[in-house]
Structures are given as C-alpha cells and as structure tokens.
Amino acid sequence: MEQPARQYESGAPSVAPAASRTLVVDLEGALLRSELLMEALFSRPALMLARFGAGGRPGMAALTDILARAEIDYAHLPYDSDVLNRALAARARGEKIYLVADRFADHAAGIATHLGFDGVVTPADLAAGSLPFDRASIEHIENRDRSRASLKTWAKALRVYQYAKNTLVFVPVITAHQLNLASFGSALLAFLAFSACASGAYLMNDLLDLAADRQHPTKRHRALAAGDLPISSALLAIPALWLFAVTAGLCISPLFLGVLGAYLVTTIAYSLVLKRKMLVDIVTLAGLYTLRIVAGAVGVGVVLSEWLLIFSLFVFTSLALIKRFSELSMRESAGLADPSNRDYRVTDLQIIAAMAAASAMNAVTVFSLYVSSSAVTPLYSRPWMLWLLNPLLLYWFGRALMMAHRREMPDDPILYTFRDGASRITVAAMICIMLAAI
C-alpha cells in the first residue's frame, strides 16, 4: 500500500518552499506495475536465452549481466497511472522528481529519461544522505503490495471464458449417442484436463507476447501485459496447471494423455514459432480445435467418425480464418500498422475472407454428403430431418463473416457464438433438430 508522505528533516523549517521540495518514487512496486528483472527476461526471451547459451559463463551473474543489456520498450511498460500522474503534477509545480532503484541502473535511467524524471537514486543514497538534491523536504512514494492478484484477475489471465472451446470434447459423446452418466463423467474430466492445459499455454503465450500485446489496442489490457498479474506468479502457475492436466489425463487413459500431450506440444510450437508463419497458423489452429474432438472420442472410448473429422477440419479452418480477418480489420480501422508477431498484412483481408467463405461452404458440402450417406441410417430414425441443418449452417457461417466484415466481432468466432443472441438461437435450433432426428 502507498505509505504516508515521509519527511526527512535536517534542521530546516518544517515547511519548505515549493521549488525546494523533491518527490522520490520507488521504481519497482510503486511506479512500475511489474518486475524489472522479468521485463528484461521476456523483452526478447529467445534472444536472451541465445545470448546466455553463447556466453560461456554459466551462473546467475552472467544471466544478470545479459538482462542488464536487454532491450526493453520503456514507452509501453505498465506504469501505475496514479503514481505517474502524481509525479508529473509535482514536476509541473516546479518540484524535482527522482526514481529510486537498487538494480539495473541503465534501465532505471532509461525509464527516468523517457518519463521526464530528474534522475535516479538508490535506497543506499537515501539512507546515507548522499543525494543530488536538498534533503530539506522529501516526499517518498514507496512500494505498493501487488503480490496477490484478485480472483477476477486470475480468471482473466487463465482465460476462463475460453473454456467454452473445450466443450468440443463432448461432441463425440453426443454424436455417438452415448448419453449416459459414465460417458459424461469421462468427458467432464477430459474437459477439466484440457482447460488446465490450455490455461497454462495461455499464460506462456502471454509471457512470450508481452511486447506485442502492449502495442495492441485490446490485448494491452490482458492481465500480464497490464501488470495486473505478476510475471513471477504466472511462472509458478504454469507448471501447476500442467501437472493437474497430466494427473487428470492419467485418470482417463494413457492414450488420452498422449492426445493431451500432442495438444500441449502443438500449442507450445504454435506460441513459439507456428503462429508467425502465414497460413501455417490457420492449419494449426484448426488442428487444435479438431484435436479436442479426437480427445473426447478417445476419453469416452467411442469410434470417431471420419465424416465428423473432415467436417470439423473445414469448420475450424473457416473460424480460424475469420479470427485472423477480425484481428486485421480491427487494426485497419484503428489505423495501425501490420502486426509484428503475425505474418499477415492488412492488405490480405480480401483473400482471407474469401478463404474463410470457401472453407465454410466446404463444411456445408461435407455435411450434405454425410446426410446422403449410409452412415447416417444406424444413428437416426428420421435422417431426413438433418437436411434442415443446412440452411442454419449457411446462416451461421454467413452471419459470422458479415459481423467480422462490419468490425462487430472483436472476439474469437466460437466465443462470439456464445455471446451473440442470434448465434445462440441458431445453435439451439440445430441441437433440437438433431435430437428430433434420433
């Protein structure tokens, strides 16, 4: 918490002239809503590790030396707006303002220069009195307790709202008509395993994307990018979440754990490399969605229909393309440059939209072929009713494309479906038709 103003007196009058007053602000804990060590580490994590590996000097001293020379974007660090405004107001009144920092002196000096502070002092300077200003009247803004994030902050960082995607593990149970307590219990455990695994991956992705997220119009509000969640807390949470996912996976079956492991490895590869490759990221995202359905089939022990697999691949390819279209169109509307962490340009919007529409139509075609096949007869007593799903699918895909084109879909298309009233009604109508066809 912010401490009351502290006065250091040396025989001077208790009230000093305004011009002689000095405000000193602790850099870490007060002004900076993050940890400077972690900011240096994740400014360019791959480059940092490469330098450390090539340095030939193992140990903490070598790592600290490398981090001290890291390239940090001072303009986009998460500063405490109240503290910063208070410091700038003091500067406007003619007071001197100094940062207090006991490590990474070059970074502290860089931040002080960028924000317009008069300089940097150390805690030892304050204690010994060896200061570059008069001690007659000093106001000290000290550390605030940010070590414990709220449940709301954790829910935001773990992307709890993204768990809606993991309901895909229930699809094989429903399509195979295995509507019993044991099957739903296994599917629920699979859902929890995927949710924990995904949350750990989201945290890792946010750590690797800190610099890019802070320059994004909406992603800069993410918990780690905004400094609401300490980086060190995220580093502890990641292995804990993955350990829970592994334990839950073992409770289902070793084969399910293998599928979950493939999902995690692919997700890590996506975060580190694949998401920066044009169209490779689209195929990977579609594969990750489809892998959830595969995991649901493995977890419950049902045979996965090749029709469902092909249909899912086209559906999720279309949705992944719509997601990229939404992100690029938002950048275009905001007048932003091409994304630095994606191999796409704003000028790619038209081709991405065309590919999304083509994948959607292919999905509808595959579904029509499925309804016409002999595979549908053993599962449905009234298979002709499934033809009613085609116009609903065409409407749903068309609406998603139109909303993205109008810049009215800020979320992932699947999440948008859960939030959009018309989409929810469409999905509910599809479920009712499928149940009636059984």
Image: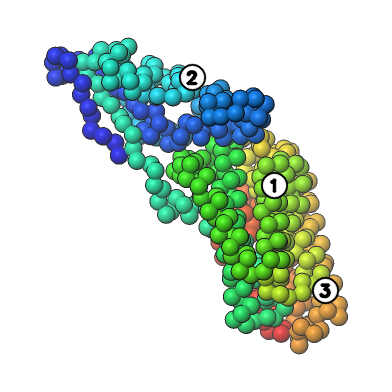
Q: Is residue 27 above or below residue 243?
A: above
Looking at the image, which is closer to me, 423 or 74? 74
Instruction: From the top left corner, tell me how far across and down residue 322 is, in percent.
Output: 69, 52
Mark 3 crowdedness (10 Å alpha carbons): few <14, some 14-19, many ≥20: some
Of the two numbered discs 1 and 2 on the same chain, state the one appearing first in sequence.
Answer: 2
Amino acid under label 3?
Tyr
Instruction: Say whether residue 315 is left or right of residue 109.
Output: right
The residue at which mark 3 appears reads as 370
Give the image quarter of residue 209.
top right
Q: Nearer the viewer, mark 2 or mark 3?
A: 2
**Residue identified by numbered label 1:** 270
Q: CA distance from mark 3 to mark 1?
A: 32 Å
- For the point 31% across and 14% down, the residue is 131
Q: Which amino acid does the dot numbered 1 rest on?
A: Tyr
Structural distance between the alpha carbons of marks 1 and 2: 34 Å
* Location of residue 415 with respect to 128 vertically, above or below: below
Task: Please give the residue where the numbered disc 2 appears in the rendered image.
Answer: 106
Horizontally, is 40 left or right of 29 in the view?
A: right
Q: In the rendered image, which quarter contains the C terminus?
A: bottom right
What residue is drawn where x is 29% and y is 20%?
126
